[in-house]
Image (cartoon, helix red, strand yellow):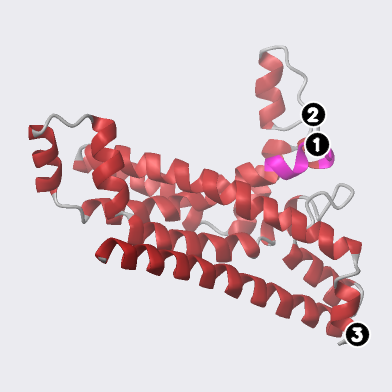
């Protein structure tokens, strides 16, 4: 019990909780919106182009996160590719991974880019399960493209959204590899997530008991958020049936 009492008085844990919360509350919605947009676009394109772009967008998921992170480190370093491109336009780019203002956004961009392919494939599968007759009937009634998306696509994708949210929440709570490789939680702990904090306490400070307490808290948090999402979705489905 002392471990848990210490945990909730540890400002470093609370800070790591806040950083993880940014990945969950900001990174996940952005990833879902981008993935859905690409899924809708691919669902309307030609089959040959769809296969090509599916492979392109899913490639970062298949690639090792370590290899991807190393590539992004060379892109984001002070004399890296991104700043070289900005210099062409006369813009002096910052040291993305060593500036407290930009390190976390840079990590989030890399995480969104890597995870977007998975969510896109899931959304695309959901879109392909929607009957074309619904869209044809809506067209006959004079519905616009936005009205079709609002009143047909989104309601039909509700089970898919439920799965994507839970899947994405678990992944967002477990962000570690890119933090470990790109920033090591820095600068000034601005990118230190809960999982990286667990790693630091266990293997850096040798506090295995405290790291275990952190792990249990992370498990309970993930479980609670997932159960809330399931409860909300089930309640909404029951209201629709009623």
Residue identified by numbered label 3 = 2
Q: Quadrant of residue 75?
A: top right
Label 3 packing within 10 angstroms: few (<14), some (14-19), many (20+): few
Up the image or down, 147 lies above or below 229; here it is above
* Residue drawn where x is 39% and y is 39% of the image: 37
Up the image or down, 17 lies above or below 75; here it is below
Which segment did they paint magenta?
Answer: 98-106
Q: Secondary structure at mark 2?
A: loop
Q: Position of residue 161 (x, y in %)?
A: 40, 57
Question: What is the spatial separation of the Cα atoms under label 1 and label 3, in whole angstroms?
Answer: 35 Å
* Of residues 184 and 33, the one drawn nearer to the viewer in this rendering: 33
* Residue drawn where x is 66% and y is 71% of the image: 221
Q: Is residue 100 magenta?
A: yes
Residue identified by numbered label 1 = 101
Label 1 packing within 10 angstroms: few (<14), some (14-19), many (20+): some
Q: Is residue 95 magenta?
A: no
Sequence-wise, the earlier of marks 1 and 2 is: 2
Q: Secondary structure at mark 3?
A: helix
Label 2 packing within 10 angstroms: few (<14), some (14-19), many (20+): some
């Amino acid at each position: 019990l002392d471990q848990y009492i210490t945990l909730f008085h540890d400002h470093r844990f609370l800070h790591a909780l806040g950083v993880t919360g940014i990945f969950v509350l900001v990174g996940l919605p952005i990833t879902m919106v981008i993935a859905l947009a690409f899924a809708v676009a691919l669902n309307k394109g030609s089959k040959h182009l769809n296969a090509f772009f599916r492979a392109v967008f899913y490639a970062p998921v298949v690639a090792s996160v370590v290899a991807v992170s190393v590539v992004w480190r060379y892109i984001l370093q002070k004399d890296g590719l991104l700043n070289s491109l900005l210099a062409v336009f006369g813009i002096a780019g910052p040291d993305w991974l060593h500036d407290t203002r930009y390190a976390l956004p840079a990590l989030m961009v890399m995480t969104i880019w890597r995870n977007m392919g998975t969510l896109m494939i899931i959304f695309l599968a959901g879109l392909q399960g929607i009957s074309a007759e619904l869209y044809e009937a809506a067209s006959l009634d004079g519905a616009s493209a936005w009205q079709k998306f609002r009143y047909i696509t989104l309601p039909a994708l509700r089970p898919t959204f439920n799965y994507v949210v839970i899947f994405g929440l678990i992944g967002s709570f477990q962000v570690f590899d890119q933090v470990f490789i790109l920033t090591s939680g820095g600068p000034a702990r601005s990118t230190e997530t809960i999982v990286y904090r667990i790693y630091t306490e266990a293997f850096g400070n040798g506090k295995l008991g405290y790291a275990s307490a952190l792990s249990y808290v992370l498990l309970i948090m993930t479980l609670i958020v997932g159960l809330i999402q399931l409860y909300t979705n089930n309640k909404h489905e029951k209201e629709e049936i009623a």
